[in-house]
Amino acid sequence: MQLADTAAATAARGQRGWALVLTSVAFFMTALDALVVVTALPAIHASLGGSVATLEWTVNAYTLPFAAGIITAAALGDRLGRRRMYIAGLVLFTLASAACALAPTAGALITARAVQGLGAALVTPLSLTILAAAFPPERRGSIVGIWGAIGGLAVAGGPLVGGAVVQGLDWHWIFWINVPIGLTAAILSAVRLPESRGQARTLDIGGLALVAAGAVALAWGLVRTTDVGWGSAQVIIALCLGAVLIAAFLAWERRVPEPMLPLRLLRIRAFTAANATGFLSMAAITSAAFLMSQFFQLGLGYGPLGTGLRFLPWTATPLLVAPPPLSGYTPGSWGPETAQDLIAPRAWHLPDS
């Protein structure tokens, strides 16, 4: 009996170890690709051509499908199997990375980047769900912290890794490097990770379509200002259309039985503040990194690696301020219930409608 218990405990530890390693590698890879391309933009421009607005879409084409699909991806994992959809996301991301490396034109690169974003939308939420399910509630707080730190490290290292690869090899290799990592992670995940499902929920296709279309319209309007100016009819129409679609999304979420974003969550100040902080910080990083990368290389004459190094004091700052005590952590504030609430938002106490 004791030997059986020992064997079971050893197997559980091994399963947790594999879950931590595999989900961490996959999450790091998808988070890294959000910014790894910024220091490669001048090299991509020299190779494929395209205007500044075209190059902007190499970043936007990744982040928009990523942001729009992440909630739906989590629902698909609950219905069809988390491991299955997680592996599908890894394979999709890997194939799209190869397509990015082989892209003959800027348009093909942008299309492949959009598919990459869809793969990342599948991997990111399901990596956290799989990781949390592998550990008992009393350890989930620390595991979520590790998972978040990995994402912060990827954001901080994105421009530096991109610059080092471009300067040492070629811009194509910032995408090729994902291929062996992604394929290995997918194969090991199929072998080492258990399958699980959550509560089946109706997919909010209407909400997804409205928020995705609204986000694309707003991004399109903002990007086009570089070429045609703020007073252009197409810019004004795109921005107004985006605002209308986002308003329609909020109205839709009020009426649909199972919304992708329960609006009652917005009454929780911690939820609203955390999401607003994340949105503003990523908006600042991605927009400024796009411009500063080109200024450092084309204006000041630094190489891709030197540019990546000069981003570090900025992108690495969250890694310095996030640990306690600067983050506001107090002993005992990460007990099992708090960690469980982070993993399962349905357990949060939502204000009455």
Image (cartoon, rainbow, N blue to C red):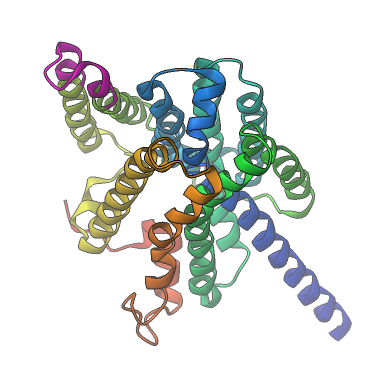
The residue furthest left is 231
Instruction: Give the extent of the magenta segment.
Output: 223-238
**In the rendered view of the protein, which quadrant contains the N terminus?**
bottom right
User: Residue 288: x percent and y percent?
Assistant: 32, 44
Q: Is residue 229 left or right of residue 258?
A: left
| Residue located at (48% from left, 45% from top) | 302
Number of labels in the image equals 0
Q: Magenta segment: does it hold 75?
A: no
The residue furthest front is 301
- Residue 292 or residue 219, whichever sits in front: 292
Query: In the picture shown, does residue 233 fall above or below 101?
Result: above
Query: In the picture shown, does residue 341 fall above or below 185?
Result: below
- Residue 148 or residue 286, whichever sits in front: 286
| Residue located at (29% from left, 59% from top) | 274
Q: Is the magenta stretch mostly helix, strand or loop?
A: helix
Where residue 22 sits, quadrant-wise, is bottom right
- Residue 30 or residue 56, whichever sits in front: 56
Q: Magenta segment: does it hold 226?
A: yes
User: Residue 184: x percent and y percent?
Assistant: 77, 45
User: Residue 103: x percent and y percent?
Assistant: 61, 20
User: Residue 133: x percent and y percent?
Assistant: 58, 61
Q: In this view, does 12 lie to the left or right of 237?
A: right
Q: Is residue 242 left or right of residue 52?
A: left
Q: Is residue 311 left or right of residue 197?
A: left
| Residue located at (71% from left, 37% from top) | 179
| Residue 138 seen in this snapshot | yes
| Residue 198 seen in this snapshot | no
| Residue located at (61% from left, 57% from top) | 24
Query: In the picture shown, does residue 170 fall above or below 232?
Result: below
Where residue 250 sits, quadrant-wise, is top left
